[in-house]
Image: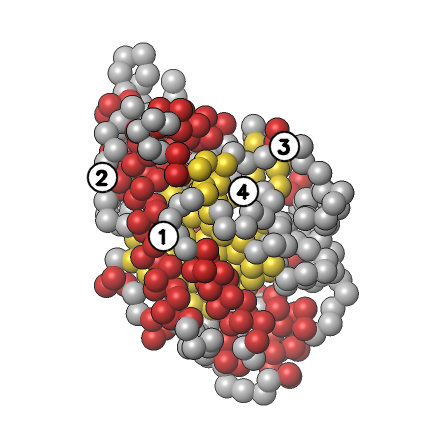
Amino acid sequence: MGTKAKVSFWVWKFESDSINRTYPMQVSEEAIVTRVQSLVQSGLSRVPPQYIQPLHARPLHHAPPGSDSDSDSDSDSVPVIDLSLFDPTARASSLDAIARACRDWGAFHVTNHGVPPSLLAAVRRAGLQFFSDCPLPDKLRYACSPSAASEGYGSKLLATSDGDTASHVLDWRDYFDHHTLPLSRRNPNRWPDFPSDYRDTVATYSDEMKLLAQKLLALISESLGLPPSCIEDAVGEFYQNITISYYPPCPQPDLTLGFQSHSDIGAITLLIQDDVGGLQILKDRHNWVTVHPFSDAILVLLADQTEIITNGKYRSCVHRAITNPDRARLSVATFHDPAKTVKISPASELIDESSPAKYRDVVYGDYVSSWYTKGPEGKRNIDALVLDS
Ligand SMILES: O=C(O)CCC(=O)C(=O)O
């Protein structure tokens, strides 16, 4: 992508002050991106200006997420769908519950999903051990390159002078992105070897998430009266990435976001978090609702391609992560996307004279490029495909 020199221009100071001084070592140019964790370890009490959100994007912190006084009423809680209820007797009402959740939230928790709780715990534990116990120079062995969506250990980049990336404010977040499916993209040698079960755990988790994503897309299709395979057929072979996000404690949570407001670009995201809390979903376009940690449940987030395929009957979910002054937080998001060459369009079964197509067809690779050049801000990328009615 040819941005390395420019990237180091924008991120100069803290790397040279904190990482290089603390860890005199040869780091590749790819590694010259400030890791938020290293900033925090350097003991700062105020966040650097490039992490300060514009006023309109700042979270309103009434209380730390997860504390007793952080009160969202139950009526404002993400719906919970018990997948064991999809037996023949309760199937119709369960599909109704999925339809309501997809229409009203674009998100829901699933319980009794068939993924062993021990595997959920293992992937959280492996991620946490990598971020919290592995020294920075070891983590930097896995540094991802500054190009879009590359695999490895990273943090967000600032915009470059020629607009290669569109971010003007940094997230308070470090991450490890794994390319997991199709199998031709999966190379566990590029993943951490600490703790010792890390690679096996992520690989097993990837396989389980794929099965669950297939099951969920089938139910979501059926909830619209479509054949069970409709959405999966439209998406084609899953391109799956697993991103473990690590949000260090932040000295000024009112000014920052762990992850800016966005909807996911692919088809469906499956997310688990730890007990700290900080994920928020935008409800009814203006109301940020905290998604309280729900042990052993998996959060389902509809993404933009599902909104297009369902012709807007179901909307993708806008979400963000806020930061916490006292505790680091970890989440694991598993994204299921089309191949870049796949053309996505509204399902023909959902289009007729009274319900015309609401979105232009788009080649997924073009959608991804637009996301990375314009930036994810809210729903701006999918809104650009909406046809005039
Ligand atoms: O950490 C979270 O809860 C949100 C992560 C997220 O939005 C993402 O990875 O797309």
Q: Whole-Å distance between the Cαs marked 2 and 1?
A: 18 Å
What residue does disc 1 label? Answer: 209
Give the mark, 3 or 2, whose residue is nearer the N terminus: 3
Closer to the camera in the image, 382 or 120? 120
Measure the alpha-carbon separation of dots 1 and 3.
Answer: 28 Å
Position in image of residue 97 (x %, y %): 44, 28
Label 1 neighbour load within 10 Å: few <14, some 14-19, many 20+? many
Residue at numbered disc 2: 233
Q: In whole angstroms, how far apart are the C-alphas of marks 1 and 4?
A: 20 Å
- The residues tagged by marks 2 and 4 sit, at their Cα atoms, a distance apart of 26 Å
Indicate left or right for 380 with 277 as reference: left
As shown in the figure, which amino acid type bears the numbered disc 2? Answer: Asp
Q: Secondary structure at mark 2?
A: helix
Identity, as a three-letter code, of the amino acid under mark 1: Met
Q: Amino acid at mark 3?
A: Asp
Q: Element type at marker 1?
A: helix
Q: Residue at x 50, y 80 (%)?
A: 138
Which residue is located at x 39 percent, y 34 percent? 85
Q: Quadrant of residue 100?
A: top left
The answer to whether residue 207 is left or right of residue 294 is left
Please name the residue shown 74% across and 68% down the image. 44
Color theme of the render: secondary structure
Image coordinates of residue 291 in percent, x first then y, are 58, 43
Is the C-beta of the residue carrying label 4 under 8 Å from the nearest atom of ligand 1? yes
Residues under numbered marks 2 and 4 in contact, where contact means CB atoms less than 8 Å apart: no
For label 3, the residue is 74
